[in-house]
Amino acid sequence: MLKLATLIWMIIGTALAGAFMIPILAVPSLAEQRMTLIPYAAGGGSLLAVPLAILVARKIYAATAARRTA
């Protein structure tokens, strides 16, 4: 399950980091501080993606468990 969770983490982490950066770049008052805020947005997206990736991997394994045993 760790391999699957790692692959899912890479996808979700990239998507969340990008989604967190959009408001920073779109709002002029935040864009002035972008050099400080972008690393926080990227790190926050990556960290938030870890439990989400584990949750998704568990659901995938649970959904395919019946097929593996049959």
Image (tube, rainbow, N blue to C red):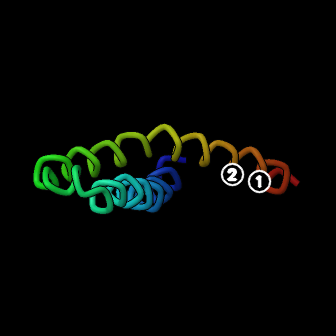
Dot 2 falls on a residue whose secondary structure is helix
49 vs 60, left or right, is left
- The front one of 27 and 16 is 27
26 vs 51, left or right, is left
- The front one of 55 and 38 is 38
Marks 2 and 1 close (CB-CB < 8 Å) = yes
x and y percentages locating residue 60 in the rendered image: 69, 51
In the image, farthest residue toward the right: 70
Residue in the image at 19% along x and 50% along y: 39
Tell me how many marks there are. 2
**Up/down of 48 relative to 22, above or below:** above
x and y percentages locating residue 40 in the rendered image: 22, 44
Separation of marks 2 and 1 at Cα, in angstroms:
6 Å
**Which disc is residue 33 wearing?**
none
- The front one of 16 and 26 is 26
**Up/down of 36 relative to 67, above or below:** above
Kindly identify which residue carries mark 2: 60
Dot 1 falls on a residue whose secondary structure is helix
Residue in the image at 11% along x and 54% along y: 35
25 vs 4, left or right, is left
x and y percentages locating residue 65 in the rendered image: 77, 48
**Up/down of 39 relative to 14, above or below:** above
Residue in the image at 35% along x and 55% along y: 23
Kindly identify which residue carries mark 1: 64
What amino acid type is highlighted by mark number 2? Ile
Residue in the image at 28% along x and 52% along y: 42
What amino acid type is highlighted by mark number 1? Thr
Q: Dot 1, crowdedness within 10 Å: few (<14), some or many (≥20)?
A: few
53 vs 57, left or right, is left
Quadrant for the C terminus, please: bottom right
